[in-house]
Image: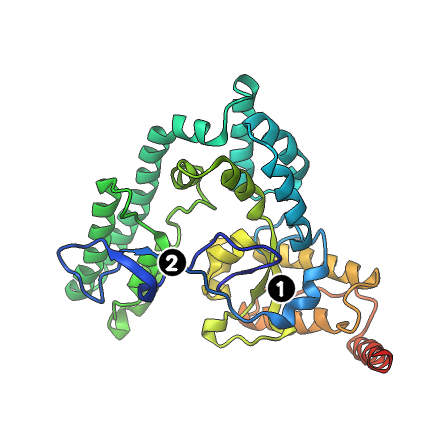
Amino acid sequence: MRITAISYYSPYIRHSQQNSTHFLNQKQNTQNDIFIKTSGVAFCANTSAGAPLRKLRNIPCPYYGGLMIAGSQIHKIEQRLEQCNTVGKVVKVLSKYTDYMQHTERKMYDRFKEYAKTNPNKTLPDYLKEVYDESLIKLKLEEFTVLDDVDMISRELSAKTALALRHKTTRCREVILANDQRDTFKRRILLNSLDEIHPKEDEKEVFERLKDRAIYLPTSGTSENAFVIKYANRSHEEIAKRIVRASVASIEHIKPDSLGGGNELSNFILASTNANSYRSNMPLTKFIERFPDIPKNCQIYIDKIIYSIHRGKLKGFETYPYDVKKTLEKESDGRINLDLSKYKHTYEEAVNAMNKYRSRYKKAG
């Protein structure tokens, strides 16, 4: 789904040809040209029914694992970071939130921390610029490794389909090697462009395998090198906030809205902004293939939700564990089968508790 962050403006942007301002391919400026520079317009799906989840704190991400920062907390954290004009001060503030950091962000924090030992009065951009050249080379190699694998798989396709695919990956390589600051290679645009290719019926299985490999293209949320390149020219303040923003809890459609997922609590979970953005509208089954620990992390998530309900949270929504269990099982083709044995309510008891609370709330209102 398209992410909807809680209580702050999300820095993540969906790419759309309708909102592009520049095509990279000067030789073939057509609707099918896939490399574009976005205008910075953010899109949000309707998540109003997920409001009850927004009040919960210290909930682990069902995708990546690890605790998430509640939307109501991020503003205060960012205010503190705004007062930190050196890497040493930023590291000191961020040290309190290491348990919440996503994998790549934690790696970057560790690098900033090490840098601060000898350069406490410098800034975050100072460090990123120092390691920029080496990171750029490493990032290109990461990208080429994935593109090489994609091209290798394309050999199993018909000549016509393989050629169409090679046109896309060749343009990727051209953009990556060009080092043009205006025209940058973006993973999401390539993934979207693959949908423009229409393989034959007997090629679809191979083509899906090819697309699954393309998902591994690095992003600033999955690669330290991509993080360095993306943020080297950003402000000190923006970089500092980015480290914690990735961990902010956001409302996530289990079945993406673009695939028909509804605005209803049974179709919502809390997920970190980073994971939500990375998944986008990827089917849950595909996302599990990318991150095999998701079923385990979903169990940890629901156990914490159950604990919260037992502590008096989510009043009037006591059936949520049962409802979300059903949705997750369906959308994952049975790969996620939550154990609700820790829940004190049977389904019937949960319905009664929900109706009782809502009836009392209605009378009070």
Q: What mark, if any, has residue 22 been given in the picture?
A: none
- Residue at left offset 53%, top offset 35%: 107
Say what secondary structure mark 2 lies in: helix
First in residue order: circle 1 vs circle 2:
2
Give the percent coordinates (x, y) of residue 328: 60, 68
- Residue at left offset 31%, top offset 67%: 195
Which residue corresponds to mark 1?
A: 269
Give the percent coordinates (x, y) of residue 280: 46, 61
Q: Is residue 261 above or below residue 161?
A: below
Please state which amino acid type lies under the numbered disc 2: Asp
Which residue corresponds to mark 2?
A: 212
Which quadrant is the C terminus positioned in?
A: bottom right
Given residues 49 and 330, the one toward you in this image is 49
Given residues 26 and 76, the one toward you in this image is 76
Give the percent coordinates (x, y) of residue 131: 39, 28
**Which of the 4 quarters of the picture holds residue 20?**
bottom left
**Which of the 4 quarters of the picture holds residue 251?**
bottom right
Marks 1/2: CA–CA distance: 24 Å
The answer to whether any part of residue 67 appears in the image is no
Determine whether label 1 and label 2 are within 8 Å by CB.
no
Circle nearer the viewer, 1 or 2: 1
Q: Classify residue 263 as left or right of residue 281.
A: right
Please state which amino acid type lies under the numbered disc 1: Ile
Mark 2 closeness class: few <14, some 14–19, many ≥20 residues within 10 Å:
some
